Amino acid sequence: MNQVEKFIEFVQEQYKTTDFIPLHEPRFLGNEKKYVLETIESTFVSSVGAYVDKFEEMMAEISQTKRAVAVVNGTAALQVALRLAGVKESDEVITQALTFVATANAIAYNNAKPVFLDVDVDTMGLSPKAVESFLEEYGELREEGCYNNRTGRKISACLPMHTFGFPVHLNELLEVCDKWNIPVVEDAAESIGSNYHGKPTGSFGQFGIYSFNGNKIVTAGGGGAIVTNDKQSGDFAKHLTTTAKKNHKYEYIHDEVGHNYRMPNLNAALICAQLEQLNSFIENKRKLAERYESFFEEKGIQFRTENPDTKANYWLMCVELNDRKERDLFLNQTNKKGVMTRPIWQLMHKLPMYAHCFRDTQKNAEYLEGRIVNIPSSVIINE
Ligand SMILES: *Cc1c(COP(=O)(O)O)cnc(C)c1O
């Protein structure tokens, strides 16, 4: 029996099934039905309701920030967070090419230009060193902020993404961005519950965002949140995502072009019940990660584990294979047998709409793109 067959058998043992095993499926094991039924019975299914408020309180606590704002999805959260961080038309935003497309799209929605810099091999997230060398070559510090001296454009934000729940090197990144006066917005869509030096990812930048899409650790079907330690910015995020409507008992008064990015109370009910289980889900996943780690250690395959001084939520677990050929064999064999696996994303500058964007060597991103594969990571029931 070859190693991949042994892996397939191992996964089937973990999930106690020989049926199709997806990468990540939701688990509704708590108060989901109760809260959703309550919401239907209250008739407050739409964007005003007790669960939206409760969700925002829970998220502020989980992210250890002063204000959380519920929005319709993580992409909308990113778009608005960038706008609030000061990103304007024709500006540049530093980010990584190794990410889910929403990160780059949110920059494009603001009519700004992504600048794709390399990732670190150990975190798979934006490399502080890559940002530093880019800024040393092209950065120009003016009174109004940092400018790219080659393009003349303002570099108005830096958007790191915590890949699969593994935190980027935040201290080093914040230090560089601070030096160049560039606000940081964290794409923590995948890293709810992950910590860096004991503090939640999402709480380090001017803004952080989370996603509650169907494939994330906790889900509302769809949903997102913006978090910040600046209460005023948080209140403004709420205003912008609720059609910029002024508070008035009965009149419609809007003071700018806002968005209808509100999270319905029905979804908020579901997500509140899910958030109550966040810690138990993460503990469950960390135990699975330990079992994967010892399984792969024996086989001489590298299973990705968290870095020192960080705690990963192990949203999507992954292995690093030796090369693209070995990767493709692994993908083929596992998917044929109903054990779902998937390669990490194609680098953003390989997609037609981002092909023209600036990018550095992408040495580490290229290395990872050809080797990293996600493996089934759902919470295991009846542990
Ligand atoms: C899931 C995700 C988002 C946002 O996703 P939505 O589906 O809009 O909630 C953004 N960035 C990354 C990296 C993601 O994985």
Image (spheres, rainbow, N blue to C red):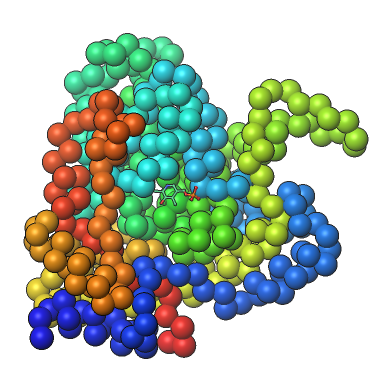
Location of residue 357 with respect to 148 vertically, above or below: below
Q: Which residue is drawn at 32% across and 46% down?
A: 99
Q: Quadrant of residue 185?
A: top left
* Residue 65 in sight: no
* Residue 270 in sight: yes
Location of residue 353 with respect to 383 vertically, above or below: above
Q: Residue at x 9, y 59 (%)?
A: 325
In front here: 35 or 337?
A: 337
Q: In which quarter of the image is residue 229?
A: top right
Location of residue 44 with respect to 285 vertically, above or below: above
Q: Quadrant of the N terminus?
A: bottom left
Image mark count: 0
Q: Position of residue 54 (x, y in %)?
A: 70, 58
Q: Residue at x 45, y 36 (%)?
A: 106
In front here: 234 or 378?
A: 378
Location of residue 299 with respect to 105 vertically, above or below: below
Q: Position of residue 280 (x, y in %)?
A: 49, 75
Q: In this view, does 209 lie to the left or right of 256?
A: left
Q: Is residue 19 left or right of residue 80?
A: left
Q: Where is residue 246 in the image (x, y as percent from the top left)?
A: 78, 30
Q: Which residue is drawn at 81% across and 26% down?
A: 253
Q: Residue furthest front?
A: 336
Q: Quadrant of the C terminus?
A: bottom left
Q: Is residue 20 left or right of residue 28?
A: left
Q: Is residue 251 left or right of residue 343?
A: right
Q: Position of residue 41 (x, y in %)?
A: 83, 67
